[in-house]
Image: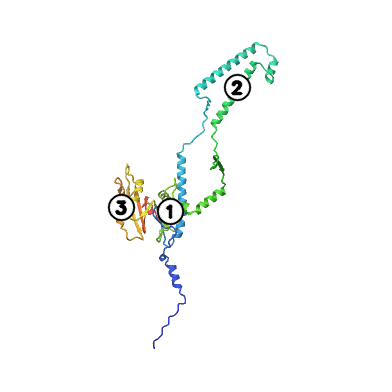
Amino acid sequence: MATEIKSKPNSHPNKINKKRKQYLPHNKPVKKGAHPLCPGVQGFFITCDGGREHKASHEAINVIDSFYEDVVEGLESQVEKLKPSVKPTNKITKFSYSDSSDEGNNENKDAEDDGQRDVDELQKKNEDEPVIGVNIVSRDKTGPQNEDDVSFNKKTQEIEEKPEDHLNQEAEAVLPPVKKLRVRTDTAESGNGSSLKVEKKSVDQLIEAELAELGNKSKRRFSKLDPGCNGVVFIQMRKRDGDPGPKDIVQHMMTSLASTRKHISRFLLRVLPIEITCYASDEEIRRAIKSLVDKYFPVETQTPRKFAVLYEARANTGIDGAKIIDAVAKSVPLPHKVDLGSPDLSIVVQIVKTVCLIGVAERYKELAKYNVRQLTSATT
């Protein structure tokens, strides 16, 4: 008789799967996000520990945003230092109300001379005639007066008022200008014409507007894109007019970390600036890199720079790395030379699947290859 072999049912079928998930987190498939990495963007290429991409992306946005604010504040302070300081002067300024200053000054001098002559003549007459109290009282009364008295009163009044006006004008020249409040004005077109509507926004309204802008993903300055590889994070930067570029932000980050040794992250490893993204082919790379070469490697220069090409590929085995390096190196004009030992600038070329990421880094080897963990560790 054939013996029947009965298979024992597994009392705990999920135990093995749970242990594999706990002890082998690197074998998890990468989930494709709603915003994949594509050509035509710029930002920051960041490496992190495998399986920590989600936490690393949120941490990277906070860290990059803080250093971005530091760079912006530094640029604003430099602009304020370059502005000339205006100090109030105690000089007396004379105002002329006529078309030509020379004619106005001559007329004023003639009028003053005539008035002085009339006053002298009246004083001589009063010295010759006896002093009568009625004449003194009649000048104070509002009744009719003589022509001589009227002319005398008018001219003495002008002489007394002139120094007061002069002092007022001098005080206005010395006082600094008053700052005006900034009010937002919106023009609304009507049937008859355009009318101005003045709107003053409170602090609560400004906060609500900023929160609404942050809620809209298309208006955020920093947002994450899914590169589709393990241990890699890409943070897109929507650069506006006057904003510093990714290179300036990363350079400031690395120099400050090298001097302070302050721990700023748990999951971030290398942070590389990316200014150009295109498809990973020789022709596309030659076209896209022209703007970057014109910016950092101009043809007409008195100080040629030494450069090196840093190449690395992920999830792409069909591309030839030597051709990519050769295409990037030949795109740089002749005054600049290749120096792998001590380059002034390093051209970073990162290939992730079918996308090529290109950027420029300064002092790459001196700053621990832009590795945040090594810069902040005590052994370096």
Verify CB contact (< 8 Å) between mark 3 and mark 2: no
Q: Residue furthest top?
A: 128
Type of residue at label 3?
Ala
CA neighbours of label 3 inside 10 A, class few (<14), some (14 to 19), many (20+): some
Closest to the observer: 243 or 164?
243
At x 50%, y 24%, the residue is: 101
Decide which of tag 1 and tag 2 comes sooner along the chain: 2
- Determine crowd level at label 2: few under 14, some 14-19, many 20+ residues with C-alpha closer than 10 A: few
The residue lying furthest to the bottom in this view is 1
Residue under label 2: 158
Coordinates of residue 142 in the picture (x, y in percent):
69, 21
Which residue position is annotated with label 3?
Answer: 327
> Residue 72's x, y, as percent?
46, 46
Query: Which residue is depicted at the point 62% across and 20% down?
Result: 154
SS class of the residue under badge 3? helix
SS state under label 2: helix
- Name which quarter of the figure residue 184 lies in: top right
Identify the mark at residue 2; answer none if there is no mark: none
Query: What residue appears at the point 60 percent right and 22 percent down from the top-left corner?
Result: 158
Q: Earlier in the sequence, mark 3 or mark 2?
A: 2
Mark 3 vs mark 2, CA separation in Å:
87 Å
Label placed on residue 236: 1
Direction from residue 376 to residue 141 in the image, left or right:
right
Report the front residue among 285 and 153.
285
The amino acid type, in three-letter code, at marker 1 is Gln
Q: In the picture, which quadrant includes the N terminus? A: bottom left
